[in-house]
Amino acid sequence: MAVPSEILSAFGFSPEGIEKVTGGLINATYSVKSAGVPIAALQQLHPVFAATVNIDIEAISDILAALGMTTPTLIRTAENRLYAVHEDKVWRALSWVPGKCYGKIPSLKVAEEGAKLIARFHRALDGHDYQFQFKREGVHDTSAHLRKLRMVQCETRLLPDGTESLRQVILSQAESLPALPSTPNRIIHGDLKISNLLFNDDDSGLCLIDLDTMARGSIAYELGDALRSWANPQGENVACPSIDVDILAAVARGYAQEGRGILSTDEIGSVVTGLETVSLELAARFCVDAFEDSYFGWDPSRFASRRTHNLMRSRGQLSLSRSVASRRPQLQELWAAPFIR
């Protein structure tokens, strides 16, 4: 997909400096270069995000910058707008923050330093009463995702083999999920996969990127989802992933060191349950997309269709949730240990 000339003109970018960035699941992203050096990230927002999300990004990035934290900031158009619209598609530009980005955790140091960065992010926003203009209702409403999985329909001939049976297994596994405690809704990033963190050359944490998903939410889902991706080095494209306890312990050490005093006892105790819950929730979401074939990006070099890719992802997340459930006491003890020293 080429960037429309009207969008390039709105931001004053040259077409010669535009290069597609691969790897994102949702927004289409391009780097903007001047004399071969990246100066901005240009994005076409997925329709799931309303244009008002940019108001939130500017407000939160202003708070972070005022506290001395590195953060990408919105680049306004020539008409001083936060975004531009072309053929009903919303485009925005963000300052380019040079740093290293990882697709998976390469070392325990990166896990620990990344967790320190997340704790600094949470501390910087702790207590702020900002009210988000854009809200994705029900993002981590696990019950709603399971209801959708129960109700979704598709012609059987379009479904990969095993989709219907997988649906039933996910719904059955959900019956054994432990209840999450009632904890405060904080300002959270909302999508802490490792590729949404940038690192310095020495692997210290630099900043968080992809801020569309910021919202008010629970630490259980915030850190549970981070552990789901960080401590699962096999990734989302395998059928039987498992939690790497050394990575989980490194994340706990890093967060506890920088974030001591931020979280309540209930919040600390909710994280492993959040990991188990969000893994099963994502299994449900991937399975829904195996039926609907409409949301998640997919890899056509490895899979015949979006449906088959999402079926594999769903099986993997189900397996991960089961793995956590089978070792729940051990993982809870390992996670909590650095916070009580």
Image (tube, rainbow, N blue to C red):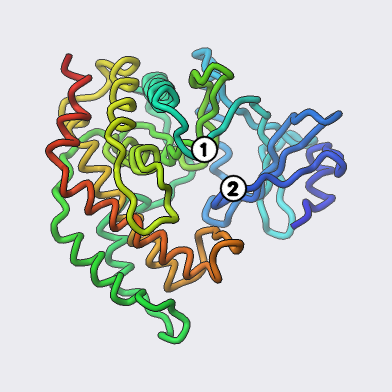
User: Along the line of sight, which residue is nearer the eye, 227 or 109?
Assistant: 109
Position in image of residue 190 (x %, y %): 41, 40
Q: Is residue 173 left or right of residue 63?
A: left
Q: Amino acid at mark 2?
A: Gly
Q: Residues within 10 Å of mark 2 (few under 14, many from 20)?
A: some
Residue 23: mark in rendering: 2
Query: Which residue shows up at 74% across the image and 54% down it?
Result: 86
How many numbered marks appear? 2
User: Along the line of sight, which residue is nearer the eye, 291 or 136?
Assistant: 291
Q: Is residue 174 left or right of residue 111?
A: left
Residue assigned mark 1? 195
Q: Amino acid at mark 1?
A: Ser
Q: In the rendered view, would you say 206 is above or below 75?
A: above
User: Along the line of sight, which residue is nearer the eye, 336 or 188?
Assistant: 336
Q: In the rendered view, would you say 92 is above or below 312?
A: above
Describe the element under mark 2 as helix, strand or loop.
Answer: loop
In which quadrant will I find the C terminus?
top left
Q: Residue 299: name its quadrant.
A: bottom right
Q: Is residue 12 left or right of residue 235?
A: right
Describe the element under mark 1 as helix, strand or loop.
Answer: helix
Residue 77: mark in rendering: none
Q: Residues within 10 Å of mark 1 (few under 14, many from 20)?
A: many
Query: Which residue shows up at 29% across the image and 51% down it?
Result: 320
Q: Earlier in the sequence, mark 1 or mark 2?
A: 2
Position in image of residue 13 (x %, y %): 83, 38
In which quadrant will I find the N terminus?
bottom right
Determine contact: label 1, label 2, CB under 8 Å.
yes
Query: Which residue shows up at 33% across the image and 38% down it?
Result: 227
**Mark 1–mark 2 distance (CA, rounded to whole Å):** 9 Å
Position in image of residue 113 (x %, y %): 42, 21
Query: Which residue shows up at 65% across the image and 25% down it?
Result: 98
